[in-house]
Image (cartoon, grey):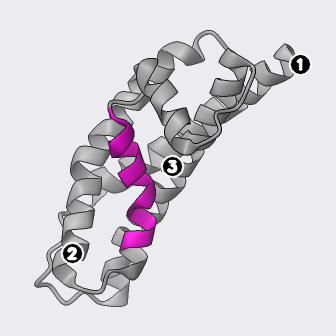
Amino acid sequence: MRKDQHYIVKSSLEKVFAALTLVDASVSSIERYNSVTQYSPKEREPFDALSDRFSRAVEICIKFFRSYDLYLYGERSETLRDLLNKMEKLDLVSSVQCWMEMRDVRNRIVHEYLPEEIQEIYDIIMGEYAIELQNFESKIKKIATTF
């Protein structure tokens, strides 16, 4: 069982690194979203890619947390909040609240229609959340060396 979990964590880490690389590529290649600009569908594509990559990366990170939780403690956390609390205690995430909000971004983007609100969401993805993911990546690089 322990050997299987080891393999699952290792595989999960590889997926996390790949997903974070895509988010970083999007963040570093687009300009800030401007709520007064009337974007064509083609001009919106980089922002759509960013939100999709970001949302997917957060979900992949959470799957990693679940596999790492099981590997370390031999049981699964019952709730996402419990899981994130454990990851915060391990100093893998800076804040449970931040990760809960990051997970909610996809839903907010899909349901927002006002350009100002969409701009706020992209600003936080490209700012605070991108930094959180970069910090997380540097922390799990140390974990990856043991797998």
| Label 2–label 1 contact, CB within 8 A | no
Q: Is residue 6 above or below residue 41?
A: above
Q: Which residue is mark 3?
A: 57
Residue positioned most to the top = 146
CB-based contact (under 8 Å), mark 2 and mark 3? no
In whole angstroms, how far apart are the C-alphas of marks 2 and 3?
22 Å
Is 97 magenta? The answer is yes
Task: Identify the residue under disc 1.
Answer: 1
Task: Say which of marks 1 and 3 sits in front.
Answer: 1
The residue that disc 2 covers is 117
* Amino acid on which disc 2 is placed: Glu
Amino acid, disc 1:
Met
Give the crowd class for mark 2: few <14, some 14-19, many >=20 residues within 10 Å. some
Q: Which residues are magenta?
A: 95-108
Which residue is at 26% across, 64% downward? Answer: 122
Mark 1 and mark 3 in contact? Answer it, CB < 8 Å.
no
Image quadrant holding the N terminus, namely top right
In-image side of 15 versus 31 (left or right)? right
Whichever of labels 2 and 1 marks the residue nearer the N terminus, that label is 1
| x, y percent for residue 20 | 46, 42
Residue placed most toward the observer, 4 or 24: 4
Vertical order, 52 against 69 (above or below): below
Mark 3 lies on a secondary structure that is helix
The quadrant in which the C terminus is found is top right
| Residue 84 horizontal/vertical position (percent) | 48, 35
